[in-house]
Image: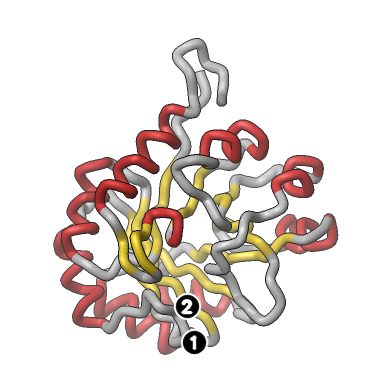
Amino acid sequence: MPEAPRIKICGLREPAHGELAGDLGVWAIGLMFAPRSPRLVDVETARTIVRATASAVARVGVFVGSSADEIGHIADAVGLTHVQVHGQADVTAIREVTGRPVLKGFGVAGPDDLDQVSRSDADLVLLDAKVAGQDGGTGHVADWDVIAAHRPTRPFLLAGGLTVDNVGEALARVRPWGVDVSSGVERARGVKDSALIAAFVAAARGAVNDDGSSG
């Protein structure tokens, strides 16, 4: 029977949602340190969320344009277990400075983008929609057909416009190692909804049927 998909709930801003993530047994939470994100949190808020989250849940800090030293300082202060970067980033240097596994986000519009994924030295990759001028977190659905047709051999997270209504189809068509959701569990931009989080987790896990098939 296929493993249940790993689930990452990204862009948390409230301790209650960190606690809920632990109760639901998700793989990871994401905390945004990208300055332009509507889900940006400061170090103290992030630390409070981490304290409310079960230790079994990975705590991923998401960065765009920060130096390795800046990332390392925040990772230590908050208690992050993983670092996620988008855009131009020296994955090797960040891993060496922070001492943490590094996730790298990639926008996917065609096969060439997936060639970059295969060559990346990140510990885990995240595939998102490719939108000009944006480094992830677009809220647009990724091109599942391209990803399925040129599916990476390495484990990857699928992001981009996932919701309760489409996560089952995404898992069936793309077969990612895990899924990453943010805007799809919000009642307003940057405002998470507990009921939507719980429903998304149930929908993702329900995509694997008792007979071992997906969908």
x and y percent of residue 184 in the render? 44, 55
Secondary structure state at the residue bearing disc 2: strand
Q: Which mark is residue 66?
A: 1
In the rendered image, the residue lying farthest to the front is 188
Q: Amino acid at mark 1?
A: Ser
Instruction: Classify 10 Å Cα crowding around label 2: few (below 14), some (14-19), many (20 and above).
Output: many
Q: Quadrant of residue 151?
A: top right
Q: Amino acid at mark 2?
A: Phe
Query: In the image, is 110 to the left or to the right of 92?
Result: right
Mark 2 and 1 residues: CB-CB less than 8 Å, in contact? yes
Secondary structure state at the residue bearing disc 1: loop
Q: CA distance from mark 2 to mark 1?
A: 6 Å
Identify which residue is drawn at 48% across, 53% down.
180
Identify which residue is drawn at 27% across, 47% down.
195
**Residue placed most toward the observer, 15 or 166:** 166
In the rendered image, the residue lying farthest to the top is 211
x and y percent of residue 211 in the render? 50, 11
x and y percent of residue 124 in the render? 56, 56
- Reply above or below: 96 against 215: below
Q: Which mark is residue 75?
A: none
**Residue placed most toward the observer, 184 or 176:** 184
Query: In the image, is 154 to the left or to the right of 3?
Result: right
Identify which residue is drawn at 48% across, 48% down.
163
Q: Kindly identify which residue carries mark 2.
A: 63
Quadrant holding the C terminus? top right
Q: Quadrant of residue 116?
A: bottom right
Identify which residue is drawn at 50% across, 72% down.
95
